[in-house]
Image (spheres, rainbow, N blue to C red):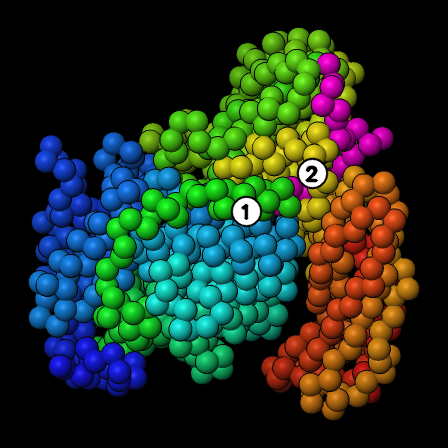
Amino acid sequence: MVKYKDTSIPIEERVEDLLQRMTVKEKVGQLNQKMYGWEAYRKTDNGIELTEAFKEQVELGDGMGALYGLFRSDPWSAVTYENGIPTHENAKWANKIQRYVMENTRLGIPVLLSEECPHGHQALDGTLIPTNIGAGSTWNPELMAEIYQHVAAEVRSRGAHLGLISTLDILRDPRWGRSEECFSEDPYLAARMTNAAVKGLQGESREELTQADKIVAVLKHFSGQGEGQGGHNAGPANIGERELREIHLPGMKAGVEAGALGCMAAYNEIDGIPCHANTTLLTEILREEWGFEGIVMADGVAVDRLTQLAGDYESAAAMALSAGVDLSLWDTAFTTLEQAVEKGKTTEDLIDRAVRRVLHLKFALGLFDQPYTDEEKALQIVGNESFRKANLQVARESAVLLKNEDQLLPLSKQTGKIAVIGPNADQIYNQLGDYTAIQQDGKGSTVLQGIKDIAEGDVTYVKGCSVRGHSKEGFPKAITAAEKSDVVILVLGGSSMRNFDLEFDSNGAAIVSGNPTDMDCGEGVDLADLRLGGVQEALVKEIAATGKPIVTVLIQGRPHAITNIVDDCEAILCGWYPGQEGGQALAEIVFGEVNPSGKLPVSLPRSSSQLPVYYNQKDQGRELQYIDSPGTALFSFGHGLSYTQFEFSHLQISPTNISVEQVNEGATVEVQVVVKNTGDLAGAEVVQLYIKDMEASITRRVKELKGFQKIWLEPNEEKMVTLQVKKEDLAIWNREMNFVVEPGNIKVMVGANSTNTLETTLALT
């Protein structure tokens, strides 16, 4: 038996044995992920068959590093239930792909199958959870780890191995269309969620990767993409190293610490250097400083974009390879690496470096030893009841009650007449976000369906208007329905729903300008004005004029500026994009079957003109205001109401004085607070811990989240909650860009949100 096929030998030795047997052409083949997976097969009258294009790709590199999106479905791929691979045959065709690659290449190296799963698997019948901005609103990493276990099981049961998941982007500008893919505007909260996602997808240890329910987490996008100039997708991030390290790098660092074995470089540049050509980012920080051992995947055609700097494909490939990119995505550039070696533009040693990483991942996944997937597994896993229940719970916890004047909510189930009005009341796709597969008719629950299932009185539905359109043709019916009702539920917001009339960029981003669509969010869909689109504000004004109480439910992928309607609505519930179970979850909250517990992971601005409005801005020693507007957010970071009341008391820290030396040696500070449910209902509260460095060698932020815990309390129950502050929380990047703890006073703040807190002081000596 050749050494690399011997399972008793350590992976590193197997990799080296295989590498020394490979030609340059075979090595380059392992670094390419050139074709769209949906072009690897086609349906014919005789069934599904592999395409000649796929076979040519295998021959091109005497093998294939990875195949992207074999199961992807959406308007860009044009894969539907009519022409896509049926779910019950997914593993069968994954095995056929694998078998063809292994049996038709000299060395029989298996191929990685990579799939999009930013909020569940983007495949036919894939279970879609709330998008990340909603997941961040749960403030519940344990729940998110559980849900990502289900996502991993679905993806692996179909035969795929890599899950591309957005966790690294920090939402600093809500005009950005990909706001929905961000967990938060805060690096600490996002890092906690990233840690949960990695452990859910990959498990707690490297050994678990060979199991039939685990996949490799490919975290994207690294790094700084949430800081794009003007809120433009892939816009330049004009920030320095300190801002990068404080805000944008903690997520990937947390991912590495959790064991992540994949990351995707970001499209943007940072201070003039594209991320795909950034050696400091991809090699010095990621690998040498943090010890990352996985692969760096390019984003779609991003290496080809480097020709703007490099001049040609070979030089662009050499630039990305040298910086630390290991696996391309749809690029032409990486297919030219053999020629780049021949022309002296790169070296075989750099190619070997990347190939080692790709091969190591394939061995770690067990693909050399067990390349095939149980072809019956998907039938038991995809869409099973345990996943549906977990998904429903995420949707429940992701909803944020923003306003509840005179306790209008919860509504009584016996409410006589309810008018449900609005463009997002009965459109399931508007609840699901971008990167969404074609859905079967009747799958999932809209807000209207959820309300009808619970309400015992009469429910009338009128659409009223569209998300972005300017027609008021539906207003008269909406007004009439409101006038005849006891309460109005307005379901407003935005949409990331792609349709088949859209045009798409080479990387799949939507090109919306000039197209008839309600899409106002998603990749490539950036806004200048954050107000609700179309005539939605006018609809609210008309309904408010009837004098009927209004409950507004926001279905949205970004924080919209709702200043113009907030006073017209007695209650406002932000549901984000709540996923397939969102309609039921939101209706349960409206009627009090579930007590809302979500907290804002991002500040809601008053207007676009006010940006930036994130809570952790630099402290300028004065209150920031405008002449024509307050400087504060409309709803602050961490805000979220409940149907019960919680009281915080007895904040104390131990010790109150601690030396820098002790902190550096691993000593921690315990922060304790008593939380009591003083209301009549059981509910969950999020205890939030913030600090403010009062004396530092560099300017600090007005406050920074450094801990949180979600707790459940019965009526009149109280709990002592203990959180810890450690070196990682207290250290700063000083003038010399060293991460150090400095002496001085630290304000410690604990509360239910970022604005109303109890305070005490920690002395660092």
Is residue 607 in view from this perspective?
no
Query: Which residue is found at the position 44% from the left and 65% from the top?
Result: 202
Query: Which residue is found at the position 58% from the left and 46% from the top?
Result: 394
Query: Which residue is found at the position 15% from the left and 59% from the top?
Result: 99
Is residue 756 in view from this perspective?
yes
Which one is nearer the viewer's eye here, 514 or 259? Answer: 259
Question: Residue 465: where, in percent of width, then height?
Answer: 55, 20
Quarter holding the N terminus is bottom left
> Residue at label 2?
594
Q: For residue 122, what is the image quadrant?
A: top left
Residue stretch in magenta = 398-416
Position of 284 with respect to 454 (left or right) is left
Question: Residue 489: where, in percent of width, then height?
Answer: 67, 24
Q: Amino acid at mark 1?
A: Ala
Q: How many other residues sit within 10 Å of disc 2, few (<14), some (14-19) or many (≥20)?
A: some
Question: Residue 483: where, in percent of width, then height?
Answer: 72, 10
Q: Amino acid at mark 2?
A: Val
The answer to whether residue 567 is above or below residue 708 is above
Q: Secondary structure at mark 2?
A: loop
User: Does the magenta run of residues contain 587?
Assistant: no
Position of 623 with respect to 105 (left or right) is right
The answer to whether residue 346 is above or below residue 509 is below
The answer to whether residue 561 is above or below residue 266 is above
Query: Which residue is found at the position 73% from the left and 33% from the top?
Result: 592
Q: How many other residues sit within 10 Å of disc 1, few (<14), some (14-19) or many (≥20)?
A: some
> Residue at label 1?
390
Q: Secondary structure at mark 1?
A: helix
